[in-house]
């Protein structure tokens, strides 16, 4: 397991996906069970200490997670509190417990960290602002490493080509020189102007939109788009590595204007993500090269270059080469 990423938060589910039954997810090859009790959301290693059954195919009863194999019951702290096969009053072995992981809900997502969190889940002001509505998208299961997925999100110059017809047009491909800054441990680009189709124009005229992209954590990124007239869209992307070459990604949008029919807005966002996935799933190698000489980079790739350097400095191994 990656020694750096084990201490990072990963969005593994939408909050609405965790109801009465436990749910299994995979984080860096580790099976994890997520479940609810009256005390909140919880995450355990998806393994009963008794005979290795997956707890995720069990049930939640009286605020305990019940193993489907022999009925062992684990409380929200991972302690086994009932072994049905034992005589009443018999002591429960101290070893009879589940491995627990830290788990929180934020931005409509369930976040899990397998180790000791290196930093809190990012606090992003617009998501707490009542002037903004929020919308959660995903999961997007992608046959590509999480590092590739995040780098693509941070890239500017693909927008006019991969997303032509939805976001922009190849005639506006030139990217002005911009800088990348380190701010409170994050990578933040200067403002970059991209010509995009106007949401509010039935003729879909191209208008200048000001972008700022940020890498918050190795596999969590953020985008702010300013359309003028006070209209702002924010997108948080969180990618969870299933393994070296497979990931699950969620995005959370915050917008302070009316995007029109929500179902249509969601369909467009899904279509844009599908366009990205076609590219991501056909890149070689599937892992992100951290050697800056492995691929040819230009000035327009400055954020990508900075991101790769940053991952190398952090010591991220999983999903990189």
Image (spheres, helix red, strand yellow):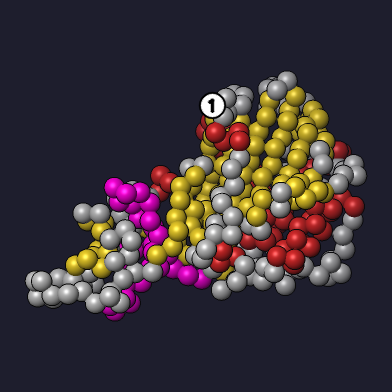
Query: Does residue 34 belong to the magenta stretch?
Result: yes
Q: Position of residue 242 (x, y in %)?
A: 54, 65
Q: Position of residue 295 (x, y in %)?
A: 84, 66
Q: Position of residue 245 (x, y in %)?
A: 62, 68
262 left or right, relative to 37? right
Above or below: residue 4 compared with residue 126: below
Above or below: residue 137 compared with residue 2: above
Res 239 quadrant in image: bottom right
Is residue 22 visible in the rendered structure shown here? yes
The quadrant the N terminus occupies is bottom right
Which range of residues does the magenta coloring cover? 29-57
In the image, what residue occupies the spot 30% across and 77% down? 95
Which of 145 and 70 lies nearest the eye of the viewer? 70
Res 75 quadrant in image: bottom left
Which residue reaches farthest left?
A: 88
Is residue 286 visible in the rendered structure shown here? no
211 left or right, relative to 266? right
In the image, what residue occupies the spot 65% across and 37% down? 234
């Amino acid at each position: 397991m990656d020694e750096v990423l084990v201490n990072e938060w990963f969005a593994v589910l939408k909050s609405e996906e965790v109801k009465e039954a436990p749910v299994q997810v995979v984080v860096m090859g580790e099976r994890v069970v997520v479940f609810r009790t009256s005390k909140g959301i919880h995450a355990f290693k998806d393994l009963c200490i008794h005979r290795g059954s997956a707890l995720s195919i069990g049930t939640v009863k009286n605020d305990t997670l019940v193993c489907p194999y022999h009925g062992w019951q684990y409380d929200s702290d991972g302690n086994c509190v009932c072994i049905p096969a034992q005589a009443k009053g018999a002591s429960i072995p101290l070893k009879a417990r589940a491995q627990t992981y830290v788990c929180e809900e934020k931005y409509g997502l369930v976040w899990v960290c397998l180790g000791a969190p290196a930093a809190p889940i990012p606090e992003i002001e617009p998501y707490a602002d009542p002037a903004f509505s929020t919308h959660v998208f995903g999961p997007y299961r992608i046959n590509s490493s999480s590092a590739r997925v995040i780098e693509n999100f941070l890239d500017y110059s693909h927008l006019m080509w991969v997303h032509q017809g939805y976001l922009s047009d190849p005639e506006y491909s030139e990217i002005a020189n911009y800088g990348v800054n380190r701010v409170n441990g994050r990578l933040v680009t200067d403002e970059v102007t991209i010509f995009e189709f106007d949401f509010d124009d039935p003729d879909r005229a191209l208008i200048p939109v000001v972008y700022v992209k940020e890498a918050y954590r190795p596999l969590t990124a953020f985008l702010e788009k300013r359309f003028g007239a006070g209209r702002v869209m924010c997108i948080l992307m969180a990618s969870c590595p299933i393994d070296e070459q497979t990931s699950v990604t969620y995005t959370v949008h915050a917008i302070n204007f009316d995007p029109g029919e929500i179902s249509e807005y969601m369909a467009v966002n899904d279509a844009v993500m599908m366009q990205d996935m076609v590219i991501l799933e056909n890149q070689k190698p599937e892992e992100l090269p951290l050697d800056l000489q492995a691929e040819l980079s230009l000035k327009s790739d400055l954020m990508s270059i900075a991101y790769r350097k940053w991952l190398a400095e952090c010591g991220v191994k999983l999903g990189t080469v």
